[in-house]
Amino acid sequence: MNSEEEFFDAETGLESDDSCEVSFKDALLFDSKQVTEGRQENGVWERRKSLPAQMISRNNFSVWSILKKCIGMELSKIAMPVEFNEPLSFLQRISEYMEHTHLIHKACSLSDSVDRMQVVAAFAVSAVASQWERTGKPFNPLLGETYELIREDEGYRWISEQVSHHPPVSAFHAQSLKQEFEFHGSIYPKLKFWGKSVEAEPKGTMVLDLLKHKEAYTWTNPMCCVHNIILGKLWIEQYGTVEIINHSTGDKCVLNFKPCGMFGKDLHKVEGYIQDKSKKKRRVIYGKWTECMYSVDPKIYDTYKKSDKRTAGDSRGLKQDNSCEGEEADEMPDVQETVTVIPGSALLWRITPRPAYSAQIYNFTSFAVTLNELEPGMEKLLAPTDCRLRPDIRAMENGDIELASAEKERLEEKQRAARRERSEEEETWSTRWFQLGVNPHTGAEDWLYTGGYFDRNYSDCPNIY
């Protein structure tokens, strides 16, 4: 089989806050009989609180026997065992950007462009927060696979499609049910194994249109690294510079997701600033992507930093490596996960507490738990290409690892056979809901939603399962 045959595989706002403590006292205890199925109550469907089965064990196979041949390679070209996965498709995983949609609604309601930029910046950070401790790999989407998500209570609907296989590209489009915003983009994840760590580069541009204000914001997500793939406790860090641009006003927000450094002083920290079109700093943004984000006046920030002797000199001489390659040690730094709040700061966003039993269900958030749920009657409405209908993901969610593995292999072979057949007949794949075009804000090539998915005409959808 040649390489081309390989399968790619807390209420938030602008209020002042002096604390960023997260409490789990109200979380439910794990009880699969009580919380794994949604239920109807007073005519309203209540979404499930957990998964049908606990996380499968990863102790019965050798990670090193598989990965030792992959050092320096792009992992999307390697067929990985199902034990590496979590029971979600990558299309479902990226829909987790919408967990904190209330931030978009908040931005829509604000009259000042700098205030809106603050909240958009918080949304950009919140979009990666669900990755905290999520060390399982999502299933690679099949070519033509789709995922829809409708949340009337949050006022939006989402559609995504796997539009390319070589390279793997996932396109998505979310729109407000009240025509307040659109959020869209395409992602080409590149994953590389460096011996002890896996580095993920989420290539692709996020676009948020605030329709009422006629504003368009663009940014790219930071790099992600999963440490201790072979031995030790798995842990994740995000690092890199994220620039959010308001193409209508010229405002810009620059966020620095800091690498943890030699002693872990900056683990999970995010710091940055907002500047207007004249390059004047208007607000400083700070916090942790695993906890919360604040903003403060630049003068207050500078004064506080100068008077904070604990900060002065701490970072001198520290080596900070922005790459997973060549590390001497991968031990997770022992740091206290709290954010020191500067007096006069405004809270922009605080992470939603996870269920107390999250570690038993792949470290899923309460939002992630609901993504693969099939509500009554949903199968009749979904496109036949929807992730919820994938038998391998469903089997893994139910704890049947042997069936999940067998179905994964069957789907991989079916996809390879379909690709060979198209090649022999000199046919090209046609996407269904997105087409390749030009991003009007960046001028770069991008996948754009063509509309029509929610008309529910799926007669020409491919048979991929």
Image: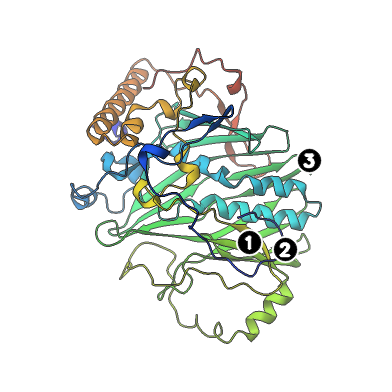
The amino acid on which the numbered mark 1 sits, given as a three-letter code, is Val
Q: Which residue appears at 56% of the width and 53% of the height? A: 126
Q: Position of residue 347 (x, y in %)?
A: 66, 62
Q: Which residue is mark 3?
A: 212
Residue count near mark 1 (Cα–Cα under 10 Å), binned few <14, some 14–19, many ≥20: some
The residue beneath circle 1 is 254
Give residue 81's position: percent from left, percent from top: 25, 40
Residue 307 image-quadrant placement: bottom right
Q: In this rendering, which labeled residue sits more in front, label 2 or label 3?
A: 3
Camera-side residue: 425 or 349?
349
At a point 21% along the width and 50% down the height, the residue shown is 59
Q: Residue at x 30, y 71 (%)?
A: 328
Q: Is residue 229 above or below residue 204?
A: below
Q: Is residue 80 visible?
A: no
Q: Toward the viewer: 46 or 19?
A: 46
Q: Secondary structure at mark 2?
A: strand
